[in-house]
Image (cartoon, rainbow, N blue to C red):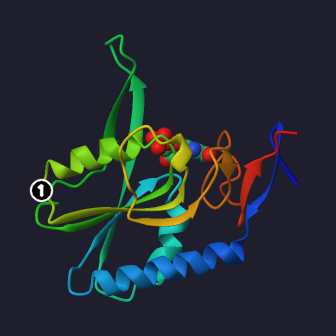
């Protein structure tokens, strides 16, 4: 059990298990993307550790970039308007693998896919460390999934609670009791 700010968390997935899954995903990508020079697009901040570890096990020619999804309240009354920061404009004809920390409702992933598709990449897939299928609100199917988890709040291995906890090596879940 650990405490981060005002909340307590317990271990959900240990670092050894994470390491093994990351290696499995890298092995699948090495096989499927040989001779395709894939471009990994990591979604900051949460995916930075997952992508760094994944990237170390990629043995085929490849490239890497980072993007960030900003949400802000727009002038319209219908809520959050998002935009992508750092998205390159030369994605046409490329094989893109978007790397996320977690897919929860799928809203972020759907938005990212729509924006990237506009540039007509040759292929577009998603790798996510964590996936909460029960929380999904969009018809999205991540292609590479580290772990499917229950829809509870998690931190560690890149994921934060109010800015903290990203440096934890294991993944922790909020202790509700
Ligand atoms: P979605 O758009 O799929 O609902 O949410 C995606 C983003 O919400 C993730 O990239 C992450 O930043 C945040 N998020 C969703 N669930 C969790 C969670 O359990 N823990 C943390 N730390 N962030 C989460």
Query: What residue sits 44% from the left and 77% below the top?
Result: 55
- Is residue 85 visible in the rendered image? The answer is no
Query: What residue sits 21% from the left and 86% below the top?
Result: 35
* Number of numbered discs visible in the structure rendering: 1
- Judged from this view, the residue extending furthest toward the top is 77
Q: Is residue 126 above or below residue 35?
A: above
- Residue 103: where, in percent of width, then height? 48, 50
Query: What residue sits 20% from the left and 65% below the top?
Result: 123
Query: What residue sits 33% from the left and 87% below the top?
Result: 31
- Is 133 positioned to the left or the right of 91 in the image? right
- Determine the quadrant in which ligand 1 lies: top right
- Residue 110: where, in percent of width, then height? 33, 44
Badge 1 residue CB within 8 Å of ligand 1:
no
Residue labelled with disc 1: 120
- Is 129 positioned to the left or the right of 66 in the image? right
Q: Quadrant of the C terminus?
A: top right
- Is 92 positioned to the left or the right of 58 in the image? left
Q: Is residue 43 above or below residue 53?
A: above
Q: Quadrant of residue 121?
A: bottom left
SS of the residue under disc 1: loop
- Is residue 57 visible in the rendered image? The answer is yes
Q: Residues within 10 Å of mark 1 (few under 14, many from 20)?
A: some
- Residue 59: where, in percent of width, then height? 38, 89
Front-most of 162 and 142? 142
Q: Quadrant of the N terminus?
A: bottom right
Q: Quadrant of residue 167?
A: bottom right
- Residue 52: where, in percent of width, then height? 50, 71
Q: Is residue 35 above or below residue 150?
A: below
């Amino acid at each position: 059990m650990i405490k981060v700010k005002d909340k307590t968390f317990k271990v959900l997935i240990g670092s050894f298990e994470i390491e093994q899954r990351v290696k499995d995903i890298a092995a699948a990508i090495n096989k499927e993307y040989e001779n395709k020079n894939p471009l990994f697009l990591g979604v900051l901040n949460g995916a930075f550790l997952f992508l760094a570890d994944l990237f170390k096990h990629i043995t085929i020619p490849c490239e890497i970039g980072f993007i960030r999804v900003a949400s802000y309240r727009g002038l319209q009354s219908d809520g959050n308007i998002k935009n992508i920061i750092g998205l390159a404009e030369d994605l046409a004809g490329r094989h893109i693998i978007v790397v996320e920390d977690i897919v929860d409702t799928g809203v972020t992933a759907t938005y990212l896919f729509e924006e990237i598709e506009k540039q007509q990449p040759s292929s577009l897939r998603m790798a996510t460390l964590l996936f909460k299928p029960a929380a999904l609100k969009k018809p999205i199917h991540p292609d590479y999934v580290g772990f499917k988890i229950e829809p509870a709040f998690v931190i560690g291995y890149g994921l934060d609670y109010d800015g903290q906890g990203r440096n934890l090596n294991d993944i922790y879940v909020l202790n509700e009791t």
